[in-house]
Amino acid sequence: MGSILYSQALFLVALFLVPFSLQQQQQQEEAAARIEQQVYNNNNNNSSTGLRSSLSNGCNLFQGKWVVDASYPLYQSSGCPFIDPEFDCQKYGRPDKEYLKYSWKPDSCALPRFDGMDFLTRWRGKKIMFVGDSLSLNQWESLSCMVHASVPNAKTTFARKALLSYVTFEDYGVTLYLYHTTYLVDIVRENVGRVLKLDSIQGGNSWNGMDMLIFNTWHWWTHKGKSQPWDYVQDGATVMKDMDRLTAFYKGLTTWARWVDQNVDPTKTKVFFQGISPTHYEGKDWKSGAKNCMGEQLPLSGSAYPAGTPPAVAVVNKVLSAMQKPVYLLDITTLSQLRKDAHPSAYSGEHSGTDCSHWCLPGLPDTWNQLLYAALGM
């Protein structure tokens, strides 16, 4: 496992630190080298590691390729009451349907087909929570639709709120929660303005008592200007206008990891971290003349993405590797990078412009949940 993470970090140094100036280039290369060395050290010096490999019984769920599968999709958007307009691409005019007909095929094993009835039976009486930003919303709605398709006549209770939403399948006592937090760590309104506190995670009080937690963050860490939801960032006692975003991500994720280590009982709660979900705003990343994902109708063939791995992946691996409590990484980055065709693009009911960040439903997040389902059975 250590060699895998070390190789990933080394690859990042070569491909992903694009500088804005010579000084910034040197600073970014030094930061990446530190991450690389710390990933290597963590995996060679820590006998108790929190990161659980995707390898289980010789099966790497996350290395494989996309294949045409006529039995897909797993549900129809018109039959699911939980999909937001921003993900309902068919309803809002997407003319092609080929993107719905792909399944993920791991190289080393078979991916079990999702069985909603089995899922409800095994998790009867349990509470499952997705914690994160709008990519968590994407995955939460996907799982809700997948389960609903298996028991379409089951009684459900559904509530959408700004902070905490949920779907309860009443006959089974299974509740799927969504806790909305863009950074996992807190944003606090103070006299100076909105402060992103890298060492504060009061929101964690709402995550206790769950039987399964699936965390996600990264999407918002690079946002600047009007789309940035904070005015200052606080690191310890230091309050500043801004800082290197990859460093801030590492510090915030370390605070989250400390919360897991201090608050989660692994005999009662399974913890997953959803890997970095990619965007497709630059056609050159997949060696295309396209401006972005708009008009893309086919996934990339093969199992490698031309632009390689986003730098945030090394940060996630570093933090998870240093944890004491077990966390399973849903390593969905590369397989999602191959799906340049799976975004809402212009076919979103709520987003203006071209959305190459989120994913259509039905679509790619259904595969994320299939992988979650497979990991639970290993």
Image (spheres, rainbow, N blue to C red):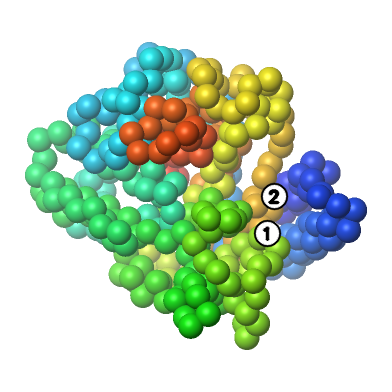
Q: Amino acid at mark 2?
A: Pro
295 up-or-down from 130: above or below: above
Residue 60 visible within the image: no
**Residue at x 40%, y 72% (from the top left corner):** 204
302 up-or-down from 193: above or below: above
Residue 218 appears left or right of 287: left
**Position of the C terminus by quadrant:** top left
**Residue at x 42%, y 66% (from the top left corner):** 266
Residue 153 appears left or right of 106: left
Residue 352 visible within the image: yes
Of the image marks 1 and 2, the number of the one nearer the N terminus: 1
The residue carrying mark 2 is 311
Q: Residues within 10 Å of mark 2 (few under 14, many from 20)?
A: many
Q: Position of residue 263 (x, y in %)?
A: 43, 75
302 up-or-down from 360: above or below: above
- Secondary structure beneath dot 1 equals helix
Residue 38 appears left or right of 223: right
Query: Which quadrant of the structure image shows residue 165?
Result: bottom left
Q: Amino acid at mark 1?
A: Leu
Please report contact status of discs 1 and 2: CB closer than 8 Å, yes or no. yes
Residue 304 appears left or right of 157: right
- Secondary structure beneath dot 2 equals loop
The residue carrying mark 1 is 246
Judge by depth and name the residue closer to the eye, 212 or 94. 94
Q: Position of residue 264 (x, y in %)?
A: 42, 71
